[in-house]
Amino acid sequence: MLISRRGLIAGAPATALMLANRKAFAQAAGKKGGDIIVGIGSPIPSLDIMGTTDDVGRIINLHLYEALVTRDEKLQPSAGLAESWEISPDGLTYTFKLRKGVKFHNGKEMTATDVKASIERYQRMSLRRRYLDQIAEVSIVDPVTVAVKLKAPQPLFLNNFSQPEVLVAILPAEDGDKDPGKTSFIGTGPYKLVENKADSHVKLARFDDYALDTRYPGPSGYGGRKDALFDTLTFRIIAEPSAMVAAIETGEIHLADLVPEHAVPGLKNNAALTVINRMPTAMQNMNMNMAVAPMDKLPFRQAIASILDMDEILAGASDGNYRLNPYLQYPGYPLYPEGVKAPLYNIKNAEKAKKLVAESGYKDEVIQIIGASTFPWHSNTALIVSEQLKSIGIKTQIETMDWPAVVALRVKKTGWSLNPGQFGTGPWLGDPVLSIGDLGGKTSANNVEDPVLAQMVADMQLKPTAEERKEAWYKAQQHIIDNVLSIKLGDIGQTQVRSNKVVGFTPFRTTRLWGVSFA
């Protein structure tokens, strides 16, 4: 199995799937049966795995869909639906051998035709299609072999190909030409979709014809051995935090994917429950729509950065489960940019901010902050930021809506100025390029193309040496800070709570329910 070191550091490729000690794969099967009920905090924007970056959607989708290459427990690229792969000497062609006997939820066996159609659909419509920008052609070698040819050598191709933020999932070929949200929602995963009721719940059922990957002794990162032990998984939407706490305390649900921090002390005193603090879980930031005035003026954006009190914002957003950090990478993780300067971060300087507002030529435009009522952290952040901006004479207006409406609005160039955001998958994987790729390109999150940053992002992926890629990442991080393209607020943790009736559950960045059962 090819192992590529995570992030911007390329590892030495191998050409065959590693042979493991088969005795290690004699895993005792857990107890089968039952319906686990998981409380999730928001509606699901989409079950089209290529059409959403949503964390909650990812939890469900990773039980439905799989990819050729995934990430293991150490976040290295590892085999999923691929049996093995080889890289041509010139670095341009990746040839994937497929696992045989893998079936889709409709009973059809997966072939190279499905793989080709799925990759091409991802290139056409995925929200993260830029990850596959370097693919020139996908061709079928034989029914179980696919060749992916690149336009130029890409040292981080396997990193991009295996990222779970928006999975390069393999779908039936007949879904290859479907528009976003119009697929059959059929995958190869251990569970299949049986019910999706908006604002209520999503129910999955064990896929009895699932092709268990016995190369692994158990779950490994986003892949590995995925024993489907529950009969059904029910993801119940519980938007009200107090209702989530009540549901886990009374046993109505078996796992609360997110509970408010103020409830943690009481939950820790409940002997029937286990409290899990995941730090870091995500980065909190402030997205800026630079297509509207006065957000298009650098001094105005600098004014915003200068006045923000990160402690007040993060405390209000996370109930105290946070830490300060101005960078798009976590401390202790690969490529944390310690040498990068962030001179305006958390300085809370009203005098400086007012001068910058005046310098920008501000004409009393109303700054529209869009906040999601679905998430307390989101609406709290919007409210606190609004008050801080008002303190230096900036007019603000908060537009509150549910999360799907926020997702729909923030891709438009009008109707909003600021939008609180969270993301964690990219930097957690050690791939800063996954964190900043939303900035600078044609589909930039701040609605303005930045050729300089776009080139830095390209260099982060394409420069031949790890040192050159690291240098490009540091320059990109400094460029983002200097030009206030986005404001990093800090890192936050999140708390899960599970019933002690649930066994085999291992905390991870994304909730995994394979290999998990009732006691």
Image (tube, helix red, strand yellow):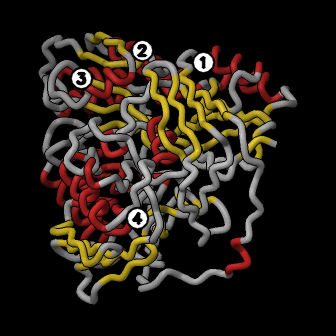
Q: Which amino acid does label 1 sit on?
A: Pro
In three-dimensional space, the C-alpha distance between marks 2 and 1, rounded to whole angstroms, equals: 18 Å
Are dots 4 and 1 in contact, CB under 8 Å?
Answer: no
Please state which of the two labelled residues, at mark 4 or mark 1, is closer to the viewer. 4
Q: Which of 12 and 317 is in front in this view?
A: 12
The answer to whether residue 475 shows anywhere in this view is: yes
Question: If you read the primary sequence from the N terminus, does the residue marked by circle 4 or circle 1 appear first?
Answer: 4
- Please state which of the two labelled residues, at mark 1 or mark 3, is closer to the viewer: 1
Amino acid at dot 3: Ser
In the drawing, does residue 407 fall left or right of residue 69?
left
From this viewpoint, which residue is outermost toward the bottom?
89
Secondary element type, mark 4 = loop
Give the Cα separation between the discs numbered 4 and 1. 37 Å
If you read the primary sequence from the N terminus, does the residue marked by circle 1 or circle 3 appear first?
Answer: 1
Question: To which residue does mark 4 refer?
Answer: 68
Q: Where is residue 135 in the image (x, y as percent from the top left)?
A: 20, 66
Q: Distance between the residues labelled 3 and 2?
A: 14 Å
Q: What element carries label 2?
A: helix
Local crowd size for mark 3, using a 10 Å CA cut-off: few (<14), some (14–19), many (≥20)? many
Q: Nearer the viewer, mark 2 or mark 1?
A: 1
Circles 1 and 3: CB distance less than 8 Å?
Answer: no
The x, y position of residue 366, in whole percent, is 21, 12
Q: Distance between the residues labelled 1 and 3?
A: 28 Å
Residue at left 32%, top 19%?
Answer: 370
Query: Mark number for residue 241?
Result: 1
Label whose residue precedes the other's in the sequence (2 or 1): 1
Q: What residue would you read off at disc 3?
A: 417
Query: In the rendering, which numbered label is found on residue 383?
Result: 2
Amino acid type of the residue that numbered disc 2 sits on in the rendered structure: Leu
Q: Marks 2 and 1: CB-CB under 8 Å?
A: no
Q: Residue furthest right?
A: 271
- Are the two marked residues, 4 and 3, in contact with CB atoms closer than 8 angstroms? no
